[in-house]
Amino acid sequence: MPEIDISPASLHRKLRTKFIGQNILYYPVTSSTMDMAKQVIRDGAEEGTIVIADRQTAGRGRLGRKWLSPPDSSILLSIILYPKLDELLRLNMAACLAVAQSIEKATGLEPTIKWPNDVLIKGKKVSGILIESDFQGGSVSYAIVGIALNVNLDPSSIPEISETATSLKEVLGQEVSRLEILRCLLGEFEELYRALRRGEPIDREWRRRLETLGKEVTVRCGEDVREGYAESVDEDGNLLLRCPDGSLVTIAAGDVTLKA
Ligand code: ATP
């Protein structure tokens, strides 16, 4: 039976990181780990502090969307960072890659990434990434990397996502230790974040896992809808979209829907 306990004591025993997760705030229930992270930033939380929860009552995704997770089924994690602006631009890439690589290391599965922020297994969403940040006088005052990962969730129990979501348990056919995945994830994330800070590129691996490239896509950014060919991504992870008139448009973030 895999461990179900993700308390700070059990995580501390397992972690091999230098600063990510050295400080752990754990809540059996919270509104959202993102909200709790904002609170502890106000109290001066140090870089690498993580907030984890077994249950969220108001988990959120991008653009006000809801993140749904039955109690104890998922990794619900926020990581507090104080990056420079150029590092902030690449944090989403680092987070998506950390999720994909940790799943692969821990389970042997080969996740792909749907630009810009979803990790998929067999075409279904297993994890969502949300970055929230704030600025003061032109520099970044903080960034929170939110990661939700369906570990032992049963998608068929949630009608809103039963067709589009998956979990590690669903794909592997057995319960998976959240503690082990979390340990791997924090280790992978620390390595990628350190690479970012050293100015090393991480876009090559990101590109390799992107399932969006080489497809005709519709990109929605608010009211703005563009259609085109997802040609490539640049080193900050922006999508390079070849439009029907031949122009190449750089898209920083948006809502990419693959054309039927
Ligand atoms: P999309 O998944 O359509 O690309 P998005 O990337 O903008 O949307 P996120 O911010 O990552 O969305 O997450 C919110 C969306 O994810 C919700 O609107 C819902 O469709 C889906 N979702 C919510 N909970 C889960 C979950 N546990 N597993 C998979 N998908 C979920």
Image (tube, rainbow, N blue to C red):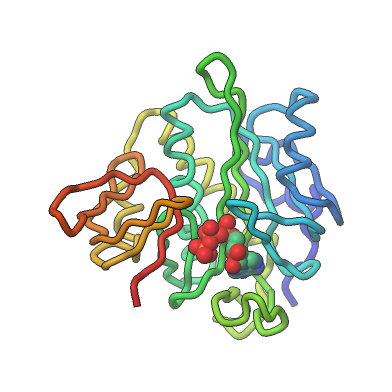
Residue at coordinates 73% horizontally, 38% vertically from top-left?
Answer: 37
258 vs 17: above or below: below
Horizontal and vertical percent for residue 136?
59, 18
Q: How many tags in the picture?
A: 0
Residue at coordinates 49% horizontally, 60% vertically from top-left?
Answer: 118
The quadrant of the rendering that contains the N terminus is bottom right
The quadrant of the rendering that contains the C terminus is bottom left
Residue at coordinates 59% horizontally, 34% vertically from top-left?
Answer: 133
Residue 59 sits in quarter: bottom right
Residue 65 relative to residue 218: left or right: right
Horizontal and vertical percent for residue 91?
48, 40
Residue 65 sits in quarter: bottom right
| Of residues 246 and 7, the one drawn nearer to the viewer in this rendering | 246
Toward the front, the furthest residue is: 223
Residue 17 sits in quarter: top right
181 vs 135: above or below: below
The answer to whether residue 150 is seen in the rendering is: no
Horizontal and vertical percent for residue 212?
33, 63
Horizontal and vertical percent for residue 20?
62, 38
Residue at coordinates 65% horizontally, 35% vertically from top-left?
Answer: 80
